Image (spheres, rainbow, N blue to C red):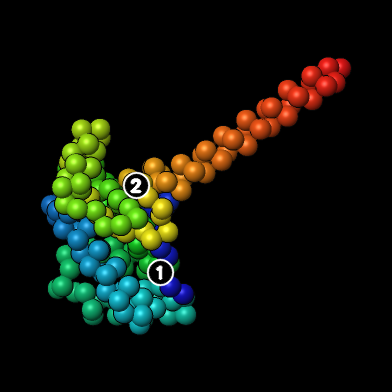
Amino acid sequence: MPLIESQPDALAKVYARSLFEAAEQSGASPETILGELEDILEIARADHRFSELLASRLIDADKRDAALERIFSGKVSPVTLNFIRLLNRKGRLGHIAPITGALDKLVQDRFGRVEVDVFTAAPVGQSELDGIRKRLTETLGKDVVIHPYTDSSMLGGIKLRIGDQLIDASVRAELRRMRDSLLNQAGSIRSRSAQIIDPN
């Protein structure tokens, strides 16, 4: 069973909030904890065997716990190690990706930052990215960190992902909106025509 890659759900947000509070109470930096979880995720995405260790239901929880202790003891903070062991006991270790995403949002909110994924049909120059960042910073009132991506399926325009919100200003989306508008207008015209022909 692979790791679950999805947007943070309600349960992921609960776990992330608990981890955030545990980090603060222990004097650990939430940013440090986030970085360690992101490192663990990066390893899991690159190493199939490690991903299976985290997510497979066929592995006994006690054996997995011993493996986690052996691999990460002394390499990550006690808060992070205790948290992934807790997820293991709860059968939620395969959900570490959305939980990490939810924690990232909490850290950004705390420090007045927001990360934005920017999708364009072709690579965008640094000056354009700086302009996008400036406009978003003014609009959102936060320090914006931009992650640019190229999406070859786009005809043009731009798409922004801010947390779990997608803002689609691509050419394809605009054409879709125009088509829907024309279809609605055509339906309205047909309805009015029918009333004129048969007013009863």
Q: Are marks 2 and 1 in contact (CB under 8 Å)?
A: no
Q: Is residue 186 left or right of residue 168?
A: right
Q: Is residue 78 visible?
A: no
Q: Which residue is mark 2?
A: 158
**Residue placed most toward the observer, 121 or 88:** 121
Q: Is residue 148 left or right of residue 53?
A: left
Q: Which residue is mark 1?
A: 3
Dot 1 lies on which element? loop
The quadrant the C terminus occupies is top right
Type of amino acid under label 1:
Leu
- Image spot of residue 170 (x, y percent): 40, 46
Q: Is residue 181 visible?
A: yes
Q: Residues within 10 Å of mark 1 (few under 14, many from 20)?
A: many
Type of amino acid under label 2:
Ile
Q: Residues within 10 Å of mark 2 (few under 14, many from 20)?
A: many
Q: CA distance from mark 2 to mark 1?
A: 29 Å
Q: For marks 2 and 1, give the one nearer the viewer.
A: 2
**Residue placed most toward the observer, 167 or 91:** 167
